[in-house]
Each structure stands twice: as structure tokens, then as C-alpha cells.
Image (cartoon, grey):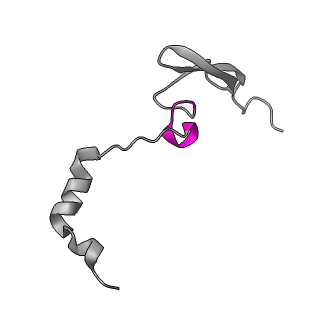
Amino acid sequence: MKKDIHPKVMPTKIFYQGKVVMETMSTRPEIHVDVWSGVHPFWTGENRFVDTEGRVDKFNKRFGDSYRTKKK
């Protein structure tokens, strides 16, 4: 391994909403995150449906019931 080309690794604290949620090793002393696995619906099993910008309404307006009743 070459000397003096690798960054220094130090203990790091991961913060979510001002609280330390985990500690790991990184090149930065602190990392602030918006989402982490402890609150993500996929990992917590919590069912949340988020309709971003009315995508479901836009789909229903465009296709209506014809999409569901269409014979294959």
C-alpha cells in the first residue's frame, strides 16, 4: 500500500433529526441524513402511501377504468 495517498479514517456519528442513530467509520467526523433505515417504510413495515404530485389521479384521468377492464 502506498503511503500518504489514503484519507484518514476516523469514528463517525450519523445524525438523523439531531439525534445520533449510529456510529461507524468514515473520513468525516459527522454525517447528517434525511432518511435512514430506522424510519424508512420498507424497513419498518409501516404502510404509507405517498401520492407525489397526484400521479395516481393523473393516471386515472388518462386511462380511467379502461386500463382495469381491458381484456387480455
The quadrant of the rendering that contains the N terminus is: top right
* Residue at image point 20% right, 69% down: 63
Q: How many marks?
A: 0
The quadrant of the rendering that contains the C terminus is: bottom left
**37 lies above or below 59:** above
In the foreground, 55 or 33: 55
State yes or no: residue 41 in magenta.
Answer: yes
**53 lies above or below 36:** below
In-image side of 51 versus 42 (left or right): left
Q: Residue furthest right?
A: 1
Percent of width and height locating residue 16? 51, 21
In-image side of 62 versus 26 (left or right): left
* Location of residue 67 (image quadrant): bottom left
Percent of width and height locating residue 11? 71, 19
**71 lies above or below 27:** below
* Residue at image point 27% right, 76% down: 69
* Residue at image point 69% right, 29% down: 7
In-image side of 69 versus 11 (left or right): left
In the foreground, 55 or 13: 55
* Location of residue 38 (image quadrant): top right
In the foreground, 49 or 3: 49
* Residue at image point 22% right, 49% down: 54
Percent of width and height locating residue 57? 20, 54
In the foreground, 33 or 72: 72
Q: Residue furthest left?
A: 61
The residue stretch that appears in magenta: 38-44
Q: Residue furthest bottom?
A: 72
Percent of width and height locating residue 33? 50, 27
